[in-house]
């Protein structure tokens, strides 16, 4: 049974979501850095930064990013399968799956970080910095894929 092809514009939902997600990841990193300053800064710095509620905003943005990452990954795979009858198992797909696992692991460390676990905090930061680094590569490889779709339509 062959699935009907989706409208051509559906091929661009995943890339647009992911570019927005990359920007949101950068913003969440900014909030995380500010939250760290609230914890580790001088009393004057802490007093000035507390009204910004950076830790709470970082947590909310992180939750949203996790949800969009999982949804976007599944959506991208679904559109590829519907339009082509198969998935293209290559670096873009495999790195995307790894990134989704990494961000889920990073999010799962939140309860431990709230209890003050320094190792969990360092692992959280490392996983998310790794994810953002891979995300930059994904943007480049993803634009190559978008170009192929555009040219071959």
Image (cartoon, grey):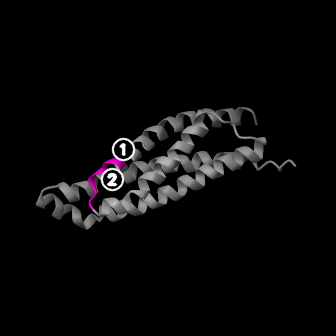
Residue 26 relative to residue 82: left or right:
left
- Would you call the spot at circle 1 few (<14 residues within 10 Å), some (14-19), or many (20 or more)? some
Res 42 label:
none
Q: Residue furthest bottom?
A: 51
Residue 87 horizontal/vertical position (percent): 71, 40
In magenta stretch: residue 117 = yes
- Determine the image quadrant of residue 48: bottom left
Residue 37 horizontal/vertical position (percent): 22, 54
Residue 80 relative to residue 122: left or right:
right
Check disc 2 and report its element: helix, strand or loop.
helix
Residue 78 horizontal/vertical position (percent): 70, 50
Instruction: Look at the picture and state if 51 lies above or below 31.
Output: below
The residue depicted at 76 percent of the width and 47 percent of the height is: 82
The residue depicted at 68 percent of the width and 32 percent of the height is: 148
Q: Which residue is mark 1?
A: 126
The residue depicted at 27 percent of the width and 53 percent of the height is: 118
Whether label 2 touches label 1, CB < 8 Å: no
Determine if residue 24 is in view.
no
Q: CA distance from mark 2 to mark 1?
A: 10 Å
Q: Earlier in the sequence, mark 2 or mark 1?
A: 2
Locate the C terminus and report the quarter of the image it occupies. top right
Residue 73 horizontal/vertical position (percent): 60, 49
The residue depicted at 28 percent of the width and 57 percent of the height is: 117
Q: Which residues are magenta?
A: 116-123
Residue 73 relative to residue 49: left or right:
right
Res 120 label:
2
For this rendering, which residue is in front, 91 or 76? 91
In magenta stretch: residue 80 = no
For this rendering, which residue is in front, 95 or 55? 95
């Amino acid at each position: 049974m062959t699935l009907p092809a989706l409208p051509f514009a559906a091929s661009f939902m995943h890339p647009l979501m992911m570019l927005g997600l990359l920007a949101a990841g950068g913003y969440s990193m900014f909030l995380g850095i500010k939250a760290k300053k609230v914890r580790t800064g001088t009393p004057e710095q802490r007093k000035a930064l507390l009204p910004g509620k950076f830790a709470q905003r970082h947590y909310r943005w992180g939750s949203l990013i996790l949800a969009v990452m999982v949804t976007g990954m599944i959506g991208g795979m679904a559109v590829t399968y519907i339009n082509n009858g198969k998935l293209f198992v290559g670096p873009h797909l495999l790195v995307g799956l790894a990134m989704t696992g990494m961000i889920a692991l990073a999010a799962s460390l939140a309860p431990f970080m709230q209890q003050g676990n320094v190792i969990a905090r360092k692992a959280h930061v490392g996983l998310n910095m790794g994810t953002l680094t891979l995300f930059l590569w994904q943007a480049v490889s993803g634009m190559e894929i978008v170009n192929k779709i555009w040219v071959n339509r």
